[in-house]
């Protein structure tokens, strides 16, 4: 009886830890996307008006990993997991309008 209770507690603790990691990684991804957009918007005043609508920024998996380290101290973020979260947040935040990403490159290699 005590082993089962301990196993349930351990499983619940691991689930909470995983959910917390995913939340931090999603926040790091949002920060990386926001940084890329701000860098792009900083270049707009010097661009000719005709080129402003075609200007594109970029956000990479390495950017997400760097932000995860800077803000949350997550040093061992697997690139495939960071790419998966970046794909999800990139699509949710309509990144295709003004940003490019390398998060889809690993999917093309697997297919």
Image: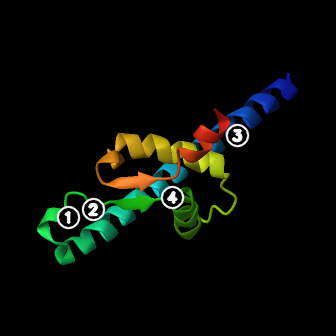
What residue do we see at 65% from left, 45% from top?
17
As helix, strand or loop, the secondary structure at mark 2 comes to loop
User: Disc 1 or 4, which lies upstream in sequence?
Assistant: 1
User: Disc 4 or 2, which lies upstream in sequence?
Assistant: 2
Does the residue at mark 4 contact the one at mark 2 (Cβ under 8 Å)?
no
Which residue extends farthest top?
1
Name the residue tied to disc 2.
55
Q: Evaluate whether residue 21 shows in this view.
A: no
For marks 1 and 3, give the CA distance.
Answer: 49 Å
As helix, strand or loop, the secondary structure at mark 1 comes to helix
From the top left corner, tell me how far across and down residue 75 is, in percent: 67, 63
For marks 2 and 1, give the CA distance.
Answer: 6 Å
Which residue extends farthest left?
49
Name the residue tied to disc 4.
60
Name the residue tied to disc 1.
51
Does the residue at mark 1 contact the one at mark 4 (Cβ under 8 Å)?
no
From the top left corner, tell me how far across and down residue 50 is, in percent: 14, 63
From the top left corner, tell me how far across and down residue 58 is, in percent: 41, 60
Name the residue tied to disc 3.
14
Quadrant, the N terminus: top right
User: Disc 4 or 3, which lies upstream in sequence?
Assistant: 3
Q: For the residue carrying disc 4, how many other residues have a C-alpha within 10 Å: few (<14), some (14-19), or many (20+)?
A: many
As helix, strand or loop, the secondary structure at mark 3 comes to helix
């Amino acid at each position: 009886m005590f082993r089962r209770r301990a196993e349930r507690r351990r499983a619940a603790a691991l689930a909470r830890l995983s959910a917390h990691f995913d939340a931090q990684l999603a926040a790091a991804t949002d920060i990386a996307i926001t940084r890329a957009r701000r860098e792009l918007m900083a270049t707009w005043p010097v661009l000719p008006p005709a080129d402003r609508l075609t200007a594109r920024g970029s956000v990479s998996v390495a950017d997400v990993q760097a932000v995860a380290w800077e803000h949350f101290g997550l040093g061992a973020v697997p690139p495939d997991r960071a790419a998966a979260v970046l794909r999800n947040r990139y699509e949710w935040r309509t990144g295709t309008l003004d940003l490019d990403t390398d998060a889809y490159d690993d999917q093309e290699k697997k297919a």
